[in-house]
Amino acid sequence: MLDASRVILGTHGQLYIDGVWQTNINKLEASVEIEKRELNLVGNDWKVHKNGAKKGTGTMTGYKVTSDMILRGFTKFEIISKLNDPESYGHESVLLKGCMVDKIQLANWTAGEEVPEETGFTFEGFELLNPIVAN
């Protein structure tokens, strides 16, 4: 049976860009999609699949605090995503390699409201640094 205390809360997530903790970020999504090549083989009435190229995409969302993303421009960087809920079975860290933003937000504000900053990006590889494994 699931021990509810082991469910990981995103509250304990952290994002680092080139080793610097981004305290303004409150949401991160990153995933890898694989291009599957569909093959038709003689003597087989099933379509089979061969793995093709992979594509990594993501979005980081938070509050605008500095002009760091504008200053960074379209240069590549690394992201480390860390989840460290003290009640979980451990912490998870994932390194996203060769990250590059899709577009740079120059202005997006409304009087009397916090200024959000959402940045889409691609990445060219990943490494699971610290996996969470149930005991």
Image (cartoon, rainbow, N blue to C red):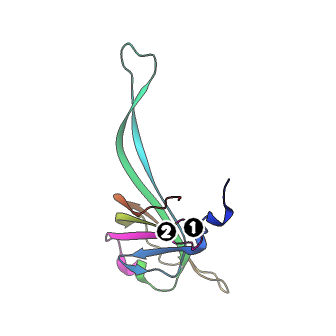
Q: At which x and y percent is residue 57?
A: 44, 58
Local packing at callout 2 (Cα closer than 10 Å; few below 14, some 14-19, many 20+) is some
Splitting the image into 4 quarters, where does residue 104 fall?
bottom left
Q: Nearer the viewer, residue 104 or 5?
A: 5
Residue drawn 37% across and 48% down? 54
Where is 56 relative to 85, above or below?
above
The image shows residue 76, relative to residue 55, as above or below, that is: below
Residue at 59 percent across and 66 percent down: it is: 8
Say which element carries label 2: loop
Categorize mark 1 by other alpha carbons within 10 Å: few (<14), some (14-19), many (20+). Answer: some
The type of residue carrying mark 1 is: Ser
Lateral position of residue 84 relative to residue 114, left or right: left
CB-based contact (under 8 Å), mark 1 and mark 2: yes
Task: Kindly state the secondary structure of the residue where label 1 is placed.
Answer: loop
Seen at 68% across and 53% down, the residue is 1
Residue assigned mark 1: 88
Please determine whether, in this image, residue 98 is positioned above or below residue 25. Answer: above
Between residue 53 and residue 134, name the one nearer to us: 134
Tell me where the magenta segment starts and ends, as one range: 70-89
Q: Say the numbered circle drawn on residue 120.
A: none
The kind of residue tagged 2 is: His
- Coordinates of residue 115 in the picture (x, y in percent): 58, 81
Query: Which residue position holds label 2?
Result: 91
Place of residue 5 in the rendered image (x, y in percent of width and height, measured from the top left): 66, 66
Give the quadrant of residue 71: bottom left
Q: Can residue 117 be seen by looking at this rendering? A: no
Residue extending farthest to the top is 43
